[in-house]
C-alpha cells in the first residue's frame, strides 16, 4: 500500500461539504486495482462490508441485515421506500428541509399515499406534533424522518420520535444519509426499523453506492412490493444472501473496495465515538473562527449537528458569495452555497478527512480577506 500511496497526488483543496468529501490517501490508493464482480475475493469484501455495517449499527444487531445498492444515497431511499411500503400503506413525513421534501417527491412519484408534516427550517421536527398526527390518522403505517437535515445542519431528535413511533405500532424509517458512522446511534436500542445512508458520507468513502440497514423480518415480508425492477431492495438482498455478496447487476467495484478501506480506517480511528468527537471539534472550531470573522451560525447551539454548519451571509450589499467561494477555493477550501428559501446563507461541512487545524486555517483565510 505504501508504494501506491506515493502515486496519489496531493489534493488541490479540501472538500468542506457533506459528501462527496475529502478522503484519505489510503482510501484513494485502494482503488488502484481492478476487481471482477463474480470473483470470490471481491464478493467476500462485500460480505465483510455488510457485516461491519451491522456491527457499527447496534450492539445487538442479530435482527438486522444490510443491503448495498448502486447509485447515490437517494437511489437507496427510493428503493427502500418503494420496497417496504405496501399499496395500502401511508407514510407520515416530518419535514424541516429539502431532504424531507425529497422523500415526499419520491413517494408521490411512486404513487404511495403520504402526509407531509412541515416545520420551520431552523426548528427540529417536534415529537409531540408527530404523536398527535399519528393519533389522529390511523391510516398511517410508516413514519419517515431525516436525522441530519443538511439543508441547515440541524439534528432532529430521532430518539424521542422513535419511542413515539414504536408505541403507536408504526414502522420507523430514518434517513441517516449524513449521520450514519459519525454519531453514536444504536438502532436496536431505539427499535428503529430501517435506515439508509451512503458510501461517501461519515464512513469517508467515495460516491457510488448507498446502503440500507433494516430488520430482517420486515424485509422478508416485502417480496413483490417493489414498484421498480432495478430498485427492488428485496431482490437485491436475496441475491446477496443466496450468492455470497453478489449484486444483481454490475456493482461499483472500485467504490466498494474504497469503502472497505474506509471502514478499516474508521475502526483504527477508534470507532464512531472517536469520529463523532473529531467532527464535533471540527464544528466548534469552525463556528468560533467564523464568528470572529463576522459570520454567525444559523442554527441554535443545542440543535446543531457535527456534520455541516449553515452560516448567515452578511447583510452588506458588498458581500458576494461567488467571490467569497472563489477566494476560499484558491486558498484550498471548497464550501457549499446555502439552500434556504428566504435567507441568504452558505454551508461548510465538518466531515471527511479534515481536522480542527484545517478549520483554523480556513478561519484565518476568511479574516485575512475583506469580503464586504
Image (cartoon, rainbow, N blue to C red):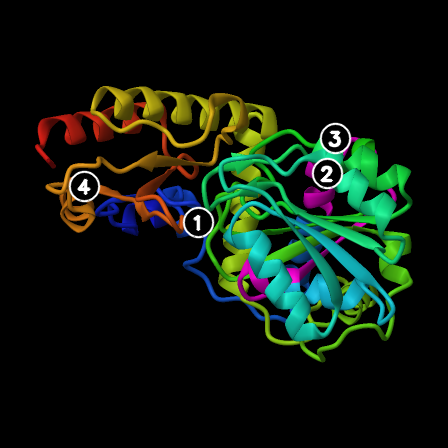
Query: In the rendered image, which quarter contains the C terminus?
Result: top left
Asked if residue 361 shows in the view, the reply is yes
Query: In the rendered image, which quarter contains the N terminus?
Result: top left
Could you classify mark 2 by the number of other residues whose Cα lies within 10 Å: few (under 14), some (14-19), or many (20 or more)? few
Could you classify mark 4 by the number of other residues whose Cα lies within 10 Å: few (under 14), some (14-19), or many (20 or more)? some
Tell whether label 2 touches label 1 (CB within 8 Å). no
Tell me: residue 273, above or below residue 316: above
Disc 3: which residue: 160
Tag nearer the camera, 1 or 2: 2
Tell whether label 4 touches label 2 (CB within 8 Å). no
Label 1: which secondary element: loop
Label 3: which secondary element: helix
Q: Position of residue 84 (x, y in %)?
A: 80, 63
**Which residue is at the front of the view, 140 or 274?**
140
Q: Is residue 122 magenta?
A: no
Tell whether label 1 touches label 3 (CB within 8 Å). no
* Residue appearing at x 26%, y 29% in the figure: 295
The numbered mark, 2 or 4, whose residue comes first in the sequence reads: 2
Q: Which corner quadrant of the image does residue 44 belong to?
A: bottom right
Q: What is the CA distance from the residue labelled 2 to the residue labelled 3?
A: 12 Å
Label 4: which secondary element: helix
Outermost residue toward the bottom in this view: 229
Disc 2: which residue: 129
Tag nearer the camera, 2 or 3: 2
* Residue appearing at x 30%, y 50% in the figure: 8
Disc 4: which residue: 328
The numbered mark, 1 or 2, whose residue comes first in the sequence reads: 1
Tell me: residue 77, above or below residue 263: below
Q: Is residue 68 magenta?
A: yes
Judge left or right: residue 58 versus residue 118: right
Disc 1: which residue: 19
* Residue appearing at x 61%, y 36% in the figure: 156
Amino acid at each position: 500500500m505504501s508504494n501506491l500511496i506515493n502515486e496519489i497526488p496531493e489534493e488541490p483543496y479540501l472538500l468542506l461539504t457533506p459528501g462527496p468529501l475529502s478522503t484519505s490517501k489510503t482510501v484513494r490508493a485502494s482503488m488502484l486495482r481492478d476487481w471482477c464482480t463474480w470473483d470470490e475475493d471481491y464478493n467476500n469484501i462485500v460480505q465483510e462490508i455488510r457485516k461491519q455495517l451491522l456491527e457499527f449499527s447496534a450492539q445487538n444487531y442479530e435482527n438486522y441485515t444490510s443491503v448495498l445498492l448502486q447509485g447515490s444515497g437517494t437511489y437507496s431511499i427510493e428503493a427502500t421506500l418503494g420496497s417496504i411500503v405496501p399499496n395500502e400503506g401511508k407514510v407520515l413525513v416530518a419535514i424541516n428541509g429539502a431532504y424531507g421534501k425529497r422523500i415526499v417527491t419520491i413517494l408521490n412519484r411512486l404513487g404511495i399515499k403520504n402526509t407531509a408534516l412541515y416545520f420551520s427550517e431552523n426548528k427540529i421536527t417536534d415529537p409531540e406534533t408527530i404523536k398527535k398526527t399519528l393519533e389522529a390518522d390511523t391510516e398511517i403505517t410508516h413514519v419517515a424522518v431525516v436525522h441530519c437535515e443538511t439543508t441547515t445542519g440541524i439534528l432532529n431528535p430521532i430518539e424521542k420520535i422513535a419511542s413515539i413511533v414504536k408505541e403507536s405500532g408504526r414502522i420507523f424509517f430514518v434517513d441517516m444519509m449524513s449521520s450514519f458512522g459519525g454519531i453514536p446511534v444504536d438502532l436496536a436500542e431505539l427499535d428503529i426499523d430501517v435506515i439508509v445512508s451512503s458510501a461517501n458520507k461519515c464512513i469517508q468513502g467515495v460516491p457510488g453506492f448507498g446502503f440500507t440497514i433494516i430488520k430482517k423480518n420486515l424485509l422478508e415480508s416485502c417480496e413483490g412490493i417493489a414498484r421498480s425492477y432495478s430498485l427492488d431492495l428485496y431482490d437485491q438482498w436475496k441475491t446477496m444472501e443466496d450468492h455470497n455478496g453478489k449484486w444483481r447487476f454490475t456493482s461499483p467495484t472500485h467504490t466498494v473496495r474504497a469503502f472497505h478501506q474506509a471502514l478499516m480506517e474508521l475502526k483504527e480511528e477508534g470507532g464512531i465515538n472517536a469520529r463523532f468527537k473529531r467532527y464535533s471539534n471540527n464544528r466548534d472550531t469552525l463556528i468560533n473562527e467564523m464568528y470572529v470573522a463576522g459570520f454567525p451560525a444559523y442554527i441554535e447551539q443545542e440543535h446543531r449537528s457535527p456534520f455541516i454548519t449553515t452560516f448567515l451571509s452578511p447583510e452588506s450589499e458588498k458581500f458576494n458569495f461567488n467571490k467569497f467561494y472563489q477566494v476560499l477555493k484558491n486558498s484550498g477550501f471548497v464550501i457549499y452555497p446555502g439552500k434556504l428559501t428566504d435567507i441568504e446563507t452558505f454551508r461548510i461541512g465538518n466531515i471527511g478527512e479534515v481536522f480542527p487545524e484545517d478549520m483554523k486555517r480556513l478561519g484565518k483565510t476568511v479574516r485575512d480577506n475583506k469580503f464586504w
